[in-house]
Amino acid sequence: MLRFLLNVIWVVCGGLVMALGWWLAGLVAAITIVGLPWARSCFVIGNFSLWPFGREARSRAEITGHNDLGTGPLGLVGNVIWFLLAGWWLAIGHLTSALACFVTIIGIPFGLQHIKLALIAVAPIGLQVVERR
């Protein structure tokens, strides 16, 4: 119940804006055709950005026990390209939102979520959103 309440407050107090930013980045990436691998990550993380409490982003290699395209060297190259083209914009958005949340004591949990999402924005390829245990 607490997770649901935190997620509702999150959506009302700015989570929707950052989720829209992720979805916009995914739409732009999908339109370019070359950006399709990044587009899927944008939409998944956009959903995570909309409803973050009770879920976390973890490496697929950690979950499955072996590397795949997104967790190996190609994933690293993809994350570098992502960071240069769009990742830093989303990270700055999350960090700015975090600073705004840290102004009040009630906003601290929301600011911490924005910092986690800013770190994800830097390198989203190879991550999978899972329910928190």
Image (spheres, grey):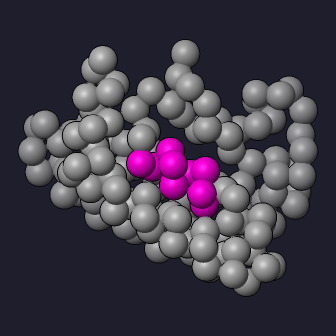
Q: Is residue 122 left or right of residue 68?
A: left
Most foreground residue, 18 or 75: 18
Residue at left offset 80%, top offset 35%? 61
Above or below residue 94? Residue 114 is above
State which quadrant residue 123 falls in: bottom right
Q: Is residue 6 visible?
A: yes
Residue at left offset 28%, top offset 20%? 2
Q: Is residue 111 visible?
A: no
Q: Position of residue 108 (x, y in %)?
A: 21, 39
Q: Position of residue 75 (x, y in %)?
A: 81, 57
Total labels drawn: 0
Residue at left offset 79%, top offset 79%? 33
Residue farthest to the bottom, as pictured: 32
Residue farthest to the left, as pictured: 104
Predominant SS along the magenta part? helix
State which quadrant residue 133 falls in: top right
State which quadrant residue 4 falls in: top left
Q: Quadrant of the N terminus?
A: top left
Q: Position of residue 53 (x, y in %)?
A: 40, 32
Q: Which residues are magenta?
A: 42-50
Does the magenta-highlighted stretch encompass residue 114?
A: no
Above or below residue 127? Residue 64 is above
Above or below residue 19? Residue 58 is above
Residue at left offset 51%, top offset 55%? 46
